[in-house]
Amino acid sequence: MTAGTVTPYRPGQQTGRDGFAQLLRAEWIKFRTVRGWVIGLVVAVLVMLGLGLFAAVGTSGSCQSKSGGPARSGQGCSTAPAPPVGPGGEAVSDSFYFVRQPLAGNGSITVRVTSLTGLIPSGNGAGTGTQPGLVPWAKAGIIIKASTQPGSAYAAMMVTADHGVRMQDNFTGDTAGQPGVVTASDPRWLRLTRSGNTIAGYDSSDGTHWTQVGTVQLAGLPPTVQSGLFATSPAYQAISESVGGGENGLIAPSQDTAVFDHVGLSGTWPAGTWTGNYIGAADASGTGGYHQAGDQFTVTGSGDIAPAVPGLGANDVTVAAFLVGTFAGLIAMIVVATMFITAEYRRGLIRVTLAASPRRGRVLAAKAIVIGSVAFVAGLVGAAAAVILGTQLARGRVSVFAVSWLTELRMVVGTAALVAVAAVLALALGTMLRRSAAAVTLAIVVIIVPYFLSLTSVLPIGATDWILRLTPAAAFATQQPVPQYAQVTALYSPGGPGGYFPLAPWAGFAVLCGWAAIALALALVLVRRRDV
Amino acid sequence: MRLPAPALHAEWTKTRTIPSTGWLLLAAIALTVAVGAAAAAGTSCPSGVVCQVDPAKVSLTGIDLGQAVVAMVAVLAISNEYSTGMIRITLSAMPRRTVVLAAKAAVLSGLVLAAGTIAVLGSVLAGRLILSGHGFTPAHGYELLSLDSPTVLRAAAGSVLYLALVALLSLGVATAVRDSAVAIGIVLGLLYLFPIVANVVGNAHWHRHLEQIGPMTAGLAIQATTDLTSLPISPWAGLGVLAAWAAAALLAGGLVLRLRDA
């Protein structure tokens, strides 16, 4: 590895001014003229891409549960269809029993719900029978939906088992209404009103005093929509977080039954008769149906109307898997960024650098900007190539979990930003320690090892959550493909296919930025105080 | 090949008189014991729940981190000579280059074995004290962590050997690439990337194979004392995989050292 060359003195260029631009240029020339560093940069991009493609190929046949993953009951691998895609571009679950009529133009539907009961697997899921009970997000109520196509836009008012009355729309929207459990003596009244693309939801406990829960805009709602009663119940999950042994879980279908009466329709309902059928694939229990007795409707369903989360089904390959090369790329980038400063100390070039530009803070700033920009570009190229080519390669082998293009963009740009700030952190550590081996080890230990420790099942989940909140590894949250949804019960752990982090993507990234800022400030103090 | 005593003595003097060696080994011991103790302190088992806790493995979690410092010691053992130019004097004094590398490997292994023994004994002691306070007692069906038990002894002795093999792997890589930053990057990449990549590879076969060939995932199989059937590779075979990595790295380092100009 040879040290960088010094910018030749060019009298014609901005004489008499020590411009920051010149300093940047000097550092850039130092960087690009060291062959080893440019090779390191190319290696970083190539390993990001290479490992991403390896992950894309290696995901084929992912139907078998990995050790520690939840046991999947009765789901074949080749037959599992890709989940439908919601209006926002994300993968969704959209299966429920629907008792419906077309609604032409504006109008409203009002019902009273007097009971919500259900069946869950007996014996904590170990047995084969069922027992009465409800999963927390068992839901039933009224819905206005663009069409009977799974994934189409909708807005719904519902009662749930444990979460009171909710207004939900387009899979990700969720607003709380009246709390409490519905019973015959304490029924719930629900109302949905369509006016153009706006749908308003109301709830009431007596049918006369109504409270508006919320309004939603459903873009592109057709003139005639499907509206009516629904019931659905997400899979029962017996997830026990066994200390030290990862998580064990069983996932089995459940069902719920709701009793409706006082069905009131206003507006144009041309059909006048009710039709009942499943939307989407019925769950394995498949025991949906409805029964009308006078004014009273009893609707039974199974499934869920909610965003899909990875890890519950066989289709749990996410774009995040293609970004696994980030770790290797980061190591290459950390090595290059550290040497960018330690090589100066080793070769004595730092004396020349500081003699040419005595304001040391500016030298450090110029170095940070150059290495940060270079790392950002490398990270962007590597991440974008891995995501695009990985998706291409995985297509046909396995269905990749759909996320919206905005999420994909955030993951790629977030990865690039993560690599850039990690490089700046490594540069600051190199400046502080002046020894490349120590700085590289420290950078890898604080950025990558915490993530590794959070993956291994040795540590309990609570401890790994704190590791991923406090250490620079929190920034890997920018690679989280699917957010944690309050309205979906799942095991949200960092090691699983969802790759869930305790912090939101940009909050996690801010933790890394905070560490880099602290390190840079310390480096600045040291570089100013000490003799070269 | 017989190692001449002067070669060993020379390497010992060089290693001993670099201040960083002692401090780094101390740091490795402290980090290993501290992380092991923290992992043990974070592990608890609510009564009435069957916990799949491997007390030995939990207590020895610190090796995951301590190995990074050990790798650094090993890398510096050779790359310091290159960065200061000392290597030219060393090779002038001892022209048989394989002897130099072998002497370095011997001195380094001795040091790491000694430091590793202290670190592992400290971890096991800390784990025994902390875990028994968290309900992992014979009354609840967990044996106290004790070196009398053959599996715990295997985990403890194996962890010491693991650290020594990681040091040899690092020495080989550093001899081959000379630069300390690049060497430590390669070594830590080899160690930590296999488990991370294996985690995202969904195919169960590939997942298992990656864990079988990764120097860290295979080598640390030695730490398991319970649930041995779920391991990707048997404990001693796993350590053998790491030994093969170390041998390959040393071989590559030795060949490059012989063939190229210092």
Image (spheres, rainbow, N blue to C red):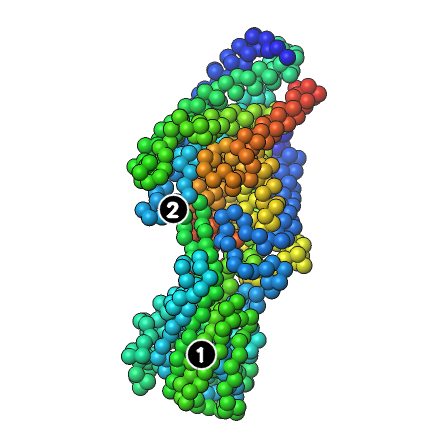
Residue A343: horizontal and vertical position, in percent?
56, 30
Could you tell me which chain the residue with mark 2 belongs to?
B
Q: Which numbered dot is residue B50? A: 2
Q: Could you say whether the residue bearing mark 1 is in a helix, strand or loop?
A: strand
**Total residue callouts:** 2
Instruction: Name the residue carrying label 1.
Output: A299
Callout 1 amino acid: Val
Residue A27: horizontal and vertical position, in percent?
58, 38
Task: Please tell me which residue is depicted at 49% across the width and 53% down the height of the picture.
Answer: A70
Q: Nearer the viewer, residue A506 or B60?
A: B60
Task: Please tell me which residue is depicted at 31% across the width and 46% down the height of the picture.
Answer: B47
Tell me whether the residue at label 2 lies in contact with that at label 1, contact meaning CB atoms closer than 8 angstroms.
no
Callout 2 amino acid: Val
Q: Nearer the viewer, residue B206 or A372?
A: B206
Task: Please tell me which residue is depicted at 32% across the width and 85% down the height of the picture.
Answer: A207
Q: Could you say whether the residue bearing mark 2 is in a helix, strand or loop?
A: loop
Taking the image as drawn, is residue A236 in sight?
Answer: yes
Q: Nearer the viewer, residue B146 or A322?
A: B146
Residue A473: horizontal and vertical position, in percent?
47, 45
Give the image quarter of residue A325. top right
Residue A275: horizontal and vertical position, in percent?
52, 84
